[in-house]
Image (cartoon, coloured by chain):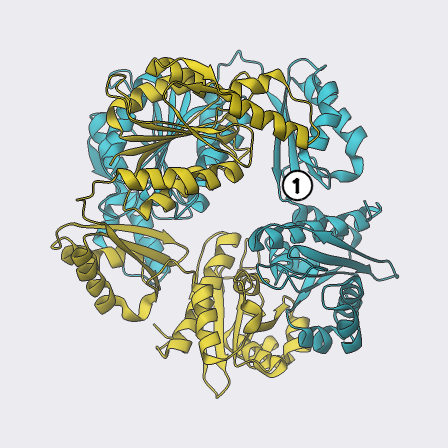
Chain colours: A cyan, B yellow
Amino acid sequence: MRIEVVNTGTELLLGKVVNTHAGYFGQELFKLGLRIQRQTTIPDGDDIRVVLNEAFPRSEVILVTGGLGPTSDDITREVVAEMLGRPLHLDQSILDTITEMFRRRGLKQNRSNDRQAMVPEGAVVLDNPHGTAPGLYLPADAVAGSPHLFLLPGPPRELKPMFESLVFPAIAGMRDAGEAPVEWRNFKIFGVGESSLASALEPDFEKISDLEVGYCARLGEVDIRLIGTLAAVEEGSILVRSGFSRDIVTESEDSIEKVILELLIERRETLATAESCTGGLIASTLTDVPGSSAVFHRGYVTYSNEAKTAILGVPGDVLATHGAVSNEVVEAMALGCLNASSADHAIAVSGIAGPGGGSDAKPVGTVHVAVASRGGELFSKRYYFPVDRISFKMRVTRLALDLLRRRLMGFPLDY
Amino acid sequence: MRIEVVNTGTELLLGKVVNTHAGYFGQELFKLGLRIQRQTTIPDGDDIRVVLNEAFPRSEVILVTGGLGPTSDDITREVVAEMLGRPLHLDQSILDTITEMFRRRGLKQNRSNDRQAMVPEGAVVLDNPHGTAPGLYLPADAVAGSPHLFLLPGPPRELKPMFESLVFPAIAGMRDAGEAPVEWRNFKIFGVGESSLASALEPDFEKISDLEVGYCARLGEVDIRLIGTLAAVEEGSILVRSGFSRDIVTESEDSIEKVILELLIERRETLATAESCTGGLIASTLTDVPGSSAVFHRGYVTYSNEAKTAILGVPGDVLATHGAVSNEVVEAMALGCLNASSADHAIAVSGIAGPGGGSDAKPVGTVHVAVASRGGELFSKRYYFPVDRISFKMRVTRLALDLLRRRLMGFPLDY
């Protein structure tokens, strides 16, 4: 099945917003054994007509994002209606939904939003609970010479739920009934590099017929995705498990923070955080998970030395002797955090995110992490991630969470 | 000047690697007043021929990334040589460089790397100090019907230095000496919706000739970008400023957190945070900015009621009477945070991020925000953002930061 993606949005071509849509579609469709053959980005405005004219004859499915908004350069809906010869009509229920959404938010509705309620004849409306403009599905039309067309909103938080609940099932249904179902499994690995994984596993993977393997590395995590027949995926899974049991965060697509929260809930234990260089990102990451309030009650962002002493009781002479970025200080932070919070586990981090603040002894990218648990276990270690500030914060956050995961699972932390 | 970008790489379409090239080129070329008209991603292999054939007649410059490597599906060099009728010859100095690079890294050189030393007749070699494959520049060729072609390596750490030092200057030199420079300005607006902005401004914008206007809305922020002649951009800017002076976060591309930190540094004042529903995201956002430690010393994540009382001194009876999500509680949190931290300003938030925890009186999406300043100013208000949990956290974070911005700039907060 030949699938193309067309992203409209001047902001994408200007580099103001990174285009994550194509990658997202690619990852999702891969689960069906399907691949995107081409992805095109064009500015808002008339180019959508040109690109669709080119793509119609060569595609079976086209996913279009953007151009459904209220402003004058959002014209995807109108262009498609015209190309397919399907007049637009006002869909009162969409208009009512938009009106209700504006009312609930206490905003004044603008007539320019009415365009978002216009639907081409024969289109299936794809509900958008996260925004005003619904998506539209126009099934393939032999007369107009058009393939299956999905018109989807641009913002990822509107697009992704819509794709998952409505578009993915529709495309899955288009696959031939006779085609063998594709199985897949995702392993999230932390603490082993992509190339080490590949060189350890590839020779054995290659002996398994009908197995396709994908890797995706990001900030210390590597996703290994196995795709193929059920037997091939099982055989491949055994290899991953036997080689990297302690490094497997999950065999699902769950995040590491979700895995940790479930472990804590299972053990009826709580966690508190004491952050310096991550500046609250560990706490924020944990609280991204619904229900985190059951196990995470408080966190401290102790950015200054004074705050480390006043809040966590880190002795001034330890700070003076070893510096804020040291095993001694993160251990004192973690123990102080356990003490102040009455939590069962505490994570503490202190490091140099940069770009300033580095020295020869402690260059930008240096970080110390400690994990303390009620009962006495205390671990700390120095790490080095010479990456940009934002990546550093994310990298350290994921490392600290993985150290806690190993503690909770009874694995050694010093891996 | 019509510029296209062609990215080759199966990994981009599978979502294993995010395509940041197009955005990077877009940001860089915008400095020359140039825009990318189209960006296309294709898999490794034969599609490059099809796409270049389509792009040749309509483009003046084509930037191609990827497909210069040593593996069998890296065929950009060979395809282009054939399309332009320019035979490939071995460039001994490139081969020597590759050989030397392998020797230095202690790697065994493979004959497949020799292909990377092949150069089409008439091509300019673009040195690649960060990898093995050099880039190639093929100037426009009227006989072959080809535009200016830049063949560039895929990995960003090889691509970016090459673009900056060799490609950007070449393209800058192609602009007509007589061409009027293009001006642009970006307004970041908070607190007014995209459609309200558009309906207020569009009628007047339309009267300005040679002005192009772009909007980009995200989590309560709207970027308005004005592009055109200097006079047109100035005229448009006056309209934005006169209509929305209090809502303009910045006339640059700076983030709201950067704007706030600069305001605080200017005033020699500090900020502390007391977060419930945002779970540390406000602190993390502030500490994304280098140098934030000068004005942000500490933050509290008081997720449980007990933490709100123990850390911030929120009275138990206020929590019992009004509930954690109330003006009374966020005011007590903000005042307690000022008190505990000795900061000059404190932000406090408490809300229901969902998906659980809502009620009829306080549905999921309800949030209260308070801003307290030393000197006595205290503001609090209820808001409602019925969006998914992650978007809610981001939306509330940006709102809280904007309220502080208005406080620091002397504008009313109750807008």
Dot 1 lies on which element? strand
Q: Residue at x 62, y 30 (%)?
A: B101
Would you place residue A223 above or below residue B273 in this image?
above
Coordinates of residue B196 in the picture (x, y in percent): 26, 58
Q: Residue at x 24, y 19 (%)?
A: A144
Coordinates of residue B253 in the picture (x, y in percent): 38, 58
**Front-most of residues A247 and A76:** A247
Coordinates of residue A252 in the picture (x, y in percent): 66, 36
Q: Residue at x 28, y 15 (%)?
A: A142
Would you place residue B341 above or below residue B375 in this image?
above
Q: Chain of mark 1?
A: A
Q: Amino acid at mark 1?
A: Glu
Q: Is residue A369 left or right of residue A376?
A: left
Would you place residue B392 above or below residue A5 in this image?
below
Residue A91 appears anywhere in the view: no
Residue A323 appears anywhere in the view: yes
**Front-most of residues A130 and B341:** B341
Say which residue label 1 marks: A221
**Front-most of residues A37 and B53:** B53
- Residue A356, by quadrant, is bottom right
Quadrant, the C terminus of chain B: bottom left
- The residue furthest right is A376
- Residue B169, by quadrant, is top left
Coordinates of residue A245 in the picture (x, y in percent): 79, 35
Q: Badge 1: how crowded within 10 Å, few (<14), some, or many (20+)?
A: many
Quadrant, the N terminus of chain B: top left
Number of marks in picture? 1
Q: Is residue A160 left or right of residue B213?
A: right
Q: Is residue B223 left or right of residue B17?
A: left
